[in-house]
Image: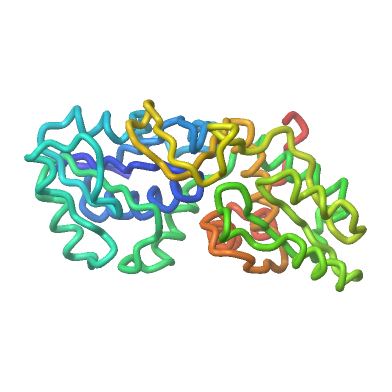
Amino acid sequence: MSFAANGKLYIVCDGGFANRINSLLPGLFLANLINYQPVICWPVNRWCGLKLCSALSVPSELLVSSLELHQIVASIDTLTLLTHNVDLPNLGPRQRRYVQHLHDSDLSFVTSLLTRTRSSLYYHDSFPAWIDLPLILSQINRFRFQPQIYSAAFRFLLSSSLLIDQAFARYTALHLRATDFASNAPDPYHWYDYVRSYPSEKFFVCSDDLTVESLFNKLPNAFVRVKRSYARKSVVDRDWRHFVFDPATDRWSPFNIERDGSSVFEALVDLVLLSSASNSIETSASSFLRLSSLLGRSQLNPRINPALFKNLSRY
């Protein structure tokens, strides 16, 4: 893909991994549509401590930056910002008048806004309704998870007999979001009873909370992967929902959570296993769970693309 010198579109990928992908894929589509060079801004911070290149193989034509949002805004004099969050830090008066809330827009209006200036910024933590899902799906197929992630998923499937002679067994995926989901988190005891009531069915169960996963180890038809690391609290003696100021991002957040690189890596292995399931249960409105559904229809899914599980012996 080649880009004329029309301008640059900074695609800010921040928050948790799924929210970052929610911004990345539409941003790439828009950059291609208006013929701007995409610059993927993927900061390593407490919400996601894993570099983009450690998570995904990135096409060589794409530029990647580790700049935080406030650093981008401060470095460019006139910048069009299209975002889900109009309360952004460090916006000067010239920049602020270009801020546009994205939820109530349409594609032609968005493209006209983006091309007002030679530098534009896209930051949206969910897929906009004004881009058709197949167009978003075409962007995710440009990527692959790194081989180390597929290798960890492959080893777990073999050890759990969910993959036999390169053939996937039928299993149901159950993702139970906890930690900073707080009162929105699904009740693990409800789902424990559900899994127990179907003893002939196989379930892959994962969570961002060790306590939740440990509960399901008691069930013979539940398969839980042992992780090296989990998300943890930024302020240990406070609840998961507690306002925390992060000087690296120059922002306050109501989520008292920190995901280091190791915990994000473990979550991405779970993401591969969720997306490879023959069936998945919608247990919450988690963006991570919604992303697994999208990946399940993509070339990143080993059940669809078996070549992903080839030549993994050295990882």
Q: Quadrant of the C terminus?
A: top right
Q: Quadrant of the N terminus?
A: top left
Residue 140 placed where, x, y %? Answer: 47, 53
Outermost residue toward the left?
Answer: 94
From the viewer's perspective, is residue 60 above or below residue 18? above
Q: How is the protein colored in the picture?
A: rainbow
Q: Is residue 69 left or right of residue 146?
A: left
* Residue drawn 54% across the image and 32% down it: 235
* Residue drawn 49% across the image and 53% down it: 141
Residue 89 placed where, x, y %? Answer: 24, 38
Q: Is residue 97 left or right of residue 28?
A: left
Is 137 or 192 nearer to us in this picture? 192
Total labels drawn: 0
* Residue drawn 65% across the image and 62% down it: 186
* Residue drawn 56% across the image and 43% down it: 239
Quarter of the image for residue 77 reads: top left
